Image (cartoon, rainbow, N blue to C red):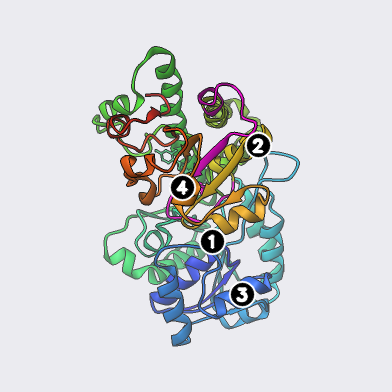
Amino acid sequence: MRISVIGCGYLGAVHAAAMAELGHDVVGVDVDEAKIALLAAGKPPFFEPGLPEILASSVASGRLRFTTDISAAAQADVHFVAVGTPQSADSYAADLRFVDAAFRSLAEHIKPGDLVVGKSTVPVGTAARLAEELAVAAPGVTLVWNPEFLREGFAVQDTVAPDRLVYGVPEGEAGERAARILDHIYASALAAGTPVIVSDYATSELVKVAANAFLATKISFINAMAEIAEVTGADVTKLADAIGHDKRIGRRFLNAGVGFGGGCLPKDIRAFTARARELGKGESIAFLDEIDKINLRRRSRVVELVTQELGGELAGKRVAMLGLAFKPHSDDVRDSPALEVALRLVEAGADVVATDPQAIESARLRAPMLTYKRSVEQTLRGADVVVLLTEWPEFVGLDPEQVGELVAEKRIIDGRNSLDQARWRSAGWRYTGLGR
Ligand code: UDX
């Protein structure tokens, strides 16, 4: 198929490369010239395992091109819109400026019979509005909503072989034809047995935010249990193991710690609550406000624990931070719990030295006041306390005996409950987890 992808951020760049890898002829379009220059040279503008390989091979084969000129979309028949929907500057609602601008400019270059496929995460009701607008601006074009569930760090795999596909289509022949075209585009996933759910627009939009709301709820649920464990002496990791054996509950996404961050979960649950209030149904998901609050309290808890460990005074104390990204296998520091904790410790007067295998550059752009070190050894040297906030394998695998020789004080706060506490304790460390 001839495909255009409008918006080459995390979602769009991966989608464009994955579609080309599947054999389609793809053009990626973005207004950011620097990003397009990198992508056109076959280089991802962010860290994502597996992406450099498929990007380079697809660009080299000519199946994948990148441009800032949206008129290139005229050569395609199917147009994926994958622009960002960040949180608005002055409210919890999603900022739809980029979506609206993408649809407006795309409408000028498409022809009757084309398919526009929305992939961005949008408030429920947006697709119906955009379909009405397209009917005027680009008659004969069909809109489908096809939400994306990719996880950073597994984005290529999640795009090529997703858990499920959701098509939000209009009623009648136009919707049936649109579903057939998407089936063709995703033929390899369908052949591998990926289930497809065909629905109306509203359901497809809600599936995405409901999935993220559920995941956020699972994480905050176990973090709420961690708060109770902290005052009762219980161990939340054992609790998670025990309830996780119940197949109805499941162990995944029950890791208590410093909580969730990133470019999706936090802003998506906030946009969902804002949209529910607009619909007069704020109370239906008012619990998501609590989910957000529990999550943010975990960051404060880590700051509190560091302060306690340092005897109540942070000024002049050296804190070694292991991790900056919002999760391992990513260089993304958007709403990263690790970065927020680091900044709050600096504000309180601590001398914070931080490291991360991939996220130093992205962290430096947002937080130039932190001291960054490439090596774990340099980060730990002379530390009064060590704080682990992103569970990269290279941190989890550290030898407590060896690194004990680098620090000034053998004190570690495991903000992801990912270390073997018995091993660290027997190497002479004061180990503090979250809720254990
Ligand atoms: C998420 C959704 O998983 C994905 O389906 C959606 O498309 C985009 O949002 P992502 O933001 O890449 O993906 O991260 P995810 O793996 O879901 O982790 C989110 C956050 O939750 C991370 O900060 C992670 O550290 C935290 N987390 C995850 C926990 O604190 N505990 C857990 O048990 C799991």
Query: Does label 1 or label 3 sit earlier along the sequence?
Result: 1
Which of label 4 and label 2 is nearer to you? 4
Which-is-in-front pick, marks 4 and 3?
4
Most foreground residue, 431 or 122: 431
Front position in the image: 397 or 144: 397
Q: Nearer the viewer, mark 1 or mark 4?
A: 4
Give the CA distance from mark 1 to mark 4.
15 Å
Hey, what amino acid is under mark 3? Answer: Ile
Location of residue 408 with respect to 436 vertically, above or below = below
Q: State the mark number for residue 327.
A: 4
- Three-letter amino acid code of the residue under disc 2: Ala
- 163 w.r.t. 27: above or below: above
- The three-letter code of the residue at mark 1 reads Tyr
Magenta part of the protein: which range?
A: 306-334
Task: Specify the principal SS of the magenta part.
Answer: loop
Residue 241 on the magenta span: no
On-image quarter of the N terminus: bottom left
For the residues labelled 4 and 3, say whether their Cβ atoms are less than 8 Å apart: no
Q: Which mark is residue 274?
A: 2
Q: Could you tell which of marks 4 and 2 lies nearer the N-terminus?
A: 2
Q: Residue at x 68, y 35 (%)?
A: 347
Indicate which disc, 3 or 2, sits on the residue closer to the N terminus: 3
SS of the residue under disc 2: helix
Snapshot quadrant of residue 120: bottom right
Quadrant observed for ligand 1 in the rendered image: top left
Find the distance from the CA under tag 4 to the CA under tag 2.
Answer: 26 Å
The three-letter code of the residue at mark 4 reads Lys
**Going 40% across and 74% down the picture, which residue do you hit?**
53
Q: CA distance from mark 1 to mark 3?
A: 13 Å
Residue where numbered disc 3 is placed: 36
Q: In the rendered structure, which disc, 2 or 1, sits on the residue that comes first in sequence? A: 1
